Image: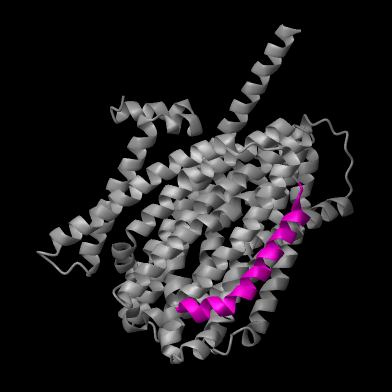
Amino acid sequence: MQESRREAEVELAADGKESRDTMLKGSAWMTGGSILSRILGAVYIIPWRIWFAGFFFQANALYVQGYNVYSILLIAAIAGIPSAVAKQVAHYNTLNEYGVGFKLYKRGLLLSISTGILVALILYFSAPFLDNGDGNVIPVMRALSWAILIIPTMSLTRGFFQGYQDMAPSAISQFVEQLVRVAYMLITALLIMHLKVIKGDWITAVSQSTFAAFMGSAAGLLVLGYYYFKRRNYYRDLVAKSDNRLQVNTMQLYKEIIQQAVPFIILGAGILIFQLIDQFTFFDLMRVFRGYPEVVLQQLFAIYAGNANKLVMITISLASALAITVVPLLSKAYTNNDKEGIRREIISGLILFEFIMIPSALGMAAIAGPLNRLFNGTGYGHLSANVLSFYSVVSIVLGLFTVISAMMQGIYQNKLAVKYFIIGTIVKIILQVPAVALFGTFGPLVSTAIGFVVTNFLILHSLTRQFHISYRLVVKRTNQILLFSILTYATALGSVFLFNWILGHFMDISATVPSGIVTFIAMFVGGFVYLYSVLKTRLADQIVGSRISRLRTVLHIK
């Protein structure tokens, strides 16, 4: 009896190690692809800003307003199908019914192509009604509508790969998509605004910058097509060896996709929905409480919704990558009725999220001054830096929502997660007016933070109640991570003050080059302090696994 128990414990530990290794491998690919894409999506702003010169803030505000509406409609076009397909494919693969998962993907293709065409037409023809009183937004939205034709199919195919825990194609296609998009943006901005080779004004240049989404998505789809055809024999072999006991008709497959997709639409657009609330309330509220002219309002909106948001989304994308990875793993544990596995994945996901997100967010807050000058110039200097610093801290709450809402979907608690998000949204709407009245430009971020705190609390409370999760280990790891993150913040902030003082004797520290020097030095110093701390204390080994010990050897840390 005792020997059988030991064997069971060994088997359980092996399963836990296997699932953690799978999660970490998937997280590495998705995090790498997501972060590289986000970095590209932020770095382009430096030359883009230079070429737009005095029109930069207005151009960025126009770009953001077009993209926010586009992003909501794009999520509707995608309809949560990629994540739903990833979860269902993982579910059927666990049952050794690869044929059903493959059929699900093919039926999903028809659905994604149809919704892509429909929503693209809706965006194109409804642009005049969604411009928020600014006619310049119309050509920007219409340029974005072309991308919606392709992106749903591309996203669906990524979901198919993720259902097999094959994250590399998704990560690589994501990077290529962003690379082509950024290249097109910069080339057209250079030709229109700087070299004047192509006739047009700053509005034309912004429209071309948004049309770049179509060029990037086309490139990303080609990459996925390459990987699919490269591995088609492998998939055929799995299908041939399936049990083939389940017979699922086409209508049932569509029903499964739609049932799983609707919550993904709402939760996947969670952060965007809050941003859209800001877009359609910020201008009117600021006119009432501050009385600023239209040009100033456009610039202030660009500061937090455009400039800061692009940088903060780099850290939030870390959480998004983790969320995508945890859904199929939780789905597998749920399918096997493995409650211990569900508890293990939830705790592992939360700790891994904190391990990456907290130091990243606090580190960005510490270097907000030079980082903001590097990417966004000196306009509204102190205000821009303070907004970025505050937004960086708020991003922890946003990232946590991304992870735990995906966990809820992974264990088929979709409706409950949507209910909690709606409650948080109501809180956001109620607080929007007093927050803007009291805090001005910071107001939308304050109401957003409180709204997501409410939603996160409700979701975590539900997970705890359902699966009897003990947070003793999470609290212990959180305290360690928080300690090292604060140390990282202090070190990075000290480096900023020190090197600003040193370089200030030789050059204007508000210029792009010295701001870049200070940013990268502070990033390196702060990052090294955190890395050294987690390696020296073996915290990294306990969270990431024993493989991290190789890095300790390379850095000669005992």
Q: Position of residue 262 (x, y in %)?
A: 76, 60
On-image quarter of the C terminus: top left
Residue 218 appears left or right of 233: left
**Residue at 40% from the left image edge and 26% from the top image edge:** 549
Residue 354 visible to the viewer: yes
Which span of residues is magenta-colored?
412-440
Q: Quadrant of residue 424?
A: bottom right
Q: Where is residue 155 in the image (x, y as percent from the top left)?
A: 63, 56
- The number of discs equals 0
Task: Depth check: give the residue in front, 352 or 481.
Answer: 481
**Residue at 40% from the left image edge and 53% from the top image edge:** 362
Rendered view: 475 above or below 397 = above
Verify whether residue 252 appears in magenta.
Answer: no
Q: Position of residue 96 (x, y in %)?
A: 78, 32
Task: Depth check: give the residue in front, 356 or 234.
Answer: 356
Q: Main SS of the magenta segment?
A: helix
Residue 512 appears left or right of 461: left
**Residue at 53% from the left image edge and 81% from the top image edge:** 282
Residue 229 appears left or right of 412: left
Residue 143 visible to the viewer: no
Q: Position of residue 50 (x, y in %)?
A: 30, 74
Residue extending furthest left? 506
Verify whether residue 431 appears in magenta.
Answer: yes
Residue 308 appears left or right of 370: right
Task: Depth check: give the residue in front, 317 or 362.
Answer: 362
On-image quarter of the N terminus: top right
Protein image colouring: one colour
